Image (cartoon, rainbow, N blue to C red):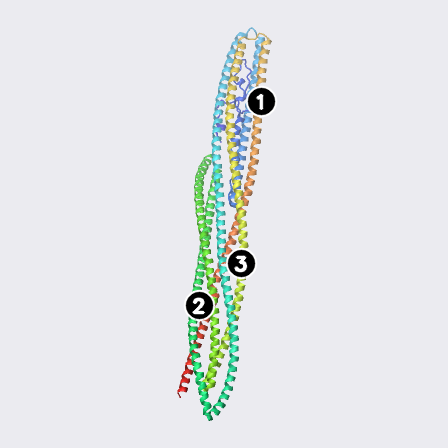
Amino acid sequence: MDDRRRNDYPTAYTTAAHPHAAPPITTSPEPTRAGGRFPGEVHRDWSYADGPGFTAMPHQTISPSFVTGTAADVRLYHAEIARLRHLLASTQSACAQQVTALRQRGEQAFVQQRNLLSGQIESLQQKLTSLQRENQQSQQSHAQEIVGVRNQLSQARRCAETANRQIVDLKQELANVATAASTEQQELQRSCESIVTRHHATIAEHLATIENLQKRVDDQEQILKHWRAAQEQAVQLSEWYESEHERDRARFAELSEDFAQFRSRTNEELTLCDDEIATLEATAGILATDHETVELINADLDHLNAKLESELQSLQVDLESVVAQSTRDGQEAQRVIERLRGELHEARVRLGAVSEEKQSLIETVANLKETADDFDASLFAKDQEIDATKRLVAETQRQLEQLRRENAGLASQNDQMRNRVRDVNNEVERLQSELADAKNRVEQAEAAVDEREHQLREIQSAARAADANALLRASEAEQQYAVELERLEAELAEQKESQDHRSNHEAAAQTRIAELEDALAESRRAVSASSAENDRLQQTIDQLGRRIADLEMAAETKAEQVTSLQAALADLQREASENEQENALLTSDSLDRKQQLAEFADRLASAQHTIEQQQKSLDEKEQQLESLQQSPPENESGTQTLEAVRAELETEFQARWSAQVRESEQHQLTLRERHHQNELNLQRTIDGLQRQIQELVDQRASFESQQAEATEQIRALQTEVDHWAQHKRPIDEVNRLSAELSRRIGQHAREREALLWRIEQLQTVRNLARAA
């Protein structure tokens, strides 16, 4: 506030101290210029629009876009509003006190001047009465009175000049106040622009936060796709394992039936062999006495031997072809198993890649959390700076200027923040392009995975066909083994000397039967264990299915949340446009106030012109008064004429003074109504901003809860990944089945070799017997 309004008045300032105070009216014969001065010369109410009563104009120019995203910012914002309201109330009270003091001083000066003028009028009336009574001495006293009146007139002129100087000072002060008001208005406008910029920066930060959340949702959806692919692979692996298990179960059932048939057939053949041995012994006793019968039997035996040799040769050829085919089938099965192992290794590698990608996502989330912590720290630092700035605002005018300079520095920082936001937007665009590339790569990887799955299915079908062929050939080999065993039984029946060897063979057969029974029990235990493992895997698959359904529901919920966030973003953008419109309205209001200042200047010029015209009329009336005083009145008619002129002047003065006062009061009432309306609009704007701030706080809380839920889901998925990484039993079961198949193929090969060796021994014994 300008101190010249309190202590820089000139010492000769006795009248017109207040714009509502009436100027003095002299009763001397020679009227003073102060008596003809009208109060319209200094209309202090015109300065109310830009004077001290409106120093709290920041209430009218505070932008409604002063929005922050935390509860601390809301409290600081309310504290700033309370401080500005207190500053407005204190300024208004100070202005009201100053106006009251000025009005009291003006009224006191007006009363003093009126009393002085009343005394002067009474003295002049007494002098006129004395002049009428003493007509003889009127010439000398009249000359002395004229000299005294002229002295009073000169004194009144000096007072008028002093009043004119005061008017000039007041005009200069009014111009200074208008300049200060315009400067403050410009500064407030710049502050409003900086606040709007800060609001846009806050909106940009919320947009960046929403984009980060959208990116996290996309990452979660990508992870969900990977988990779905892994689950499908696990399901396919379990289906393949189930089919292998069913096939092994069928093979085991067939082997059990074949073993039962082989055992029953062996028992029957042993019984037949015993009967034939008894018959042959009786026949040998008979043939011992009958040489011809023996020769016939030898001929039959030679014929049978030749037939047996031809059959053995054909059997050996078939056996070699079967062994070669079995070897090729074993090699093919081994290659298929190796290929399956390679596919499993690739699946493990892909799972490891997914785990690494998940780890990188977790690290990215941690980095984002660190960035959020840094941003919160910077916000806290900004809050501390704002608190310091608010403490500085409560100080003197010099500290207010320093605060404005700091606000200019904050505007530059806001520009820097805008540049940073622009860089962040560019980075977000780059990350979006990288995300699109990553999505393309993921699609290519999914296509490759589909192709690999197709190849894996073909390999599985080929493996199943190979297993079927192997089983068929094994059954054929077993049939051939049964035929050979029958032939061996016949040979044993024909050869008496091989009775010991037959007993050994029976013992070996019993041992083989015991081994087969042990293998059967072991196979049953393996089947029960595999069925239990299969049931556990089925339960795990069901749990994974339910988990995937929950994840799909969570993904749908997140999609709905993203849609709501996009709607909230659209609302924020719409509110930002509304705030910009309000800023435009404030700018137009500022232009209107500038126009009002221009109108005030025009009115001041017109008032100056009116004052000059009144000064001219006052000079003319002074000349008329001087002419009247130069011709001294002889009777009562001159006195009445002078009193009529004075009454007319006083009446005109009072009428003009009342009109000026009414106009000033009307203007002040209009300004008060406008100020009250602006305060109501500001309060409504503040309430709307508070609601927006609360909504933003709620949205931030919901974002944090969603982030916590996403983190918890990531942790649960990581736990499941670790669990399935440790769970390798399906792969071990596949390896075990492959080893069992190889073992059985080798066992069949060894049995064929044993049969060939036995056939060779029988041929050797036959040749020796024939030679003997």
Labels 3, 1: front one: 3
Graded by Cα atoms within 10 Å as few (under 14), some (14 to 19) or many (20 or more), the crowding at tag 3 reads: few
Mark 1 or mark 2, which has the lower sequence index? 2
* Quadrant of the snapshot with the C terminus: bottom left
Nearer to me, 2 or 679: 679
Amino acid bearing label 2: Ala
Amino acid bearing label 1: Ala
Mark 3 or mark 2, which has the lower sequence index? 2
Image location of residue 289, percent across then percent down: 47, 93
Mark 3 or mark 1, which has the lower sequence index? 3
Graded by Cα atoms within 10 Å as few (under 14), some (14 to 19) or many (20 or more), the crowding at tag 2 reads: many
Residue matched to label 2: 333
Q: Which residue lies furthest to the top in this view?
A: 136
On residue 547, which mark appears? 3
Q: Is 309 on the left-hand or right-hand side of 27?
A: left
Nearer to me, 704 or 378: 704
On residue 659, which mark appears? 1
Nearer to me, 501 or 417: 501
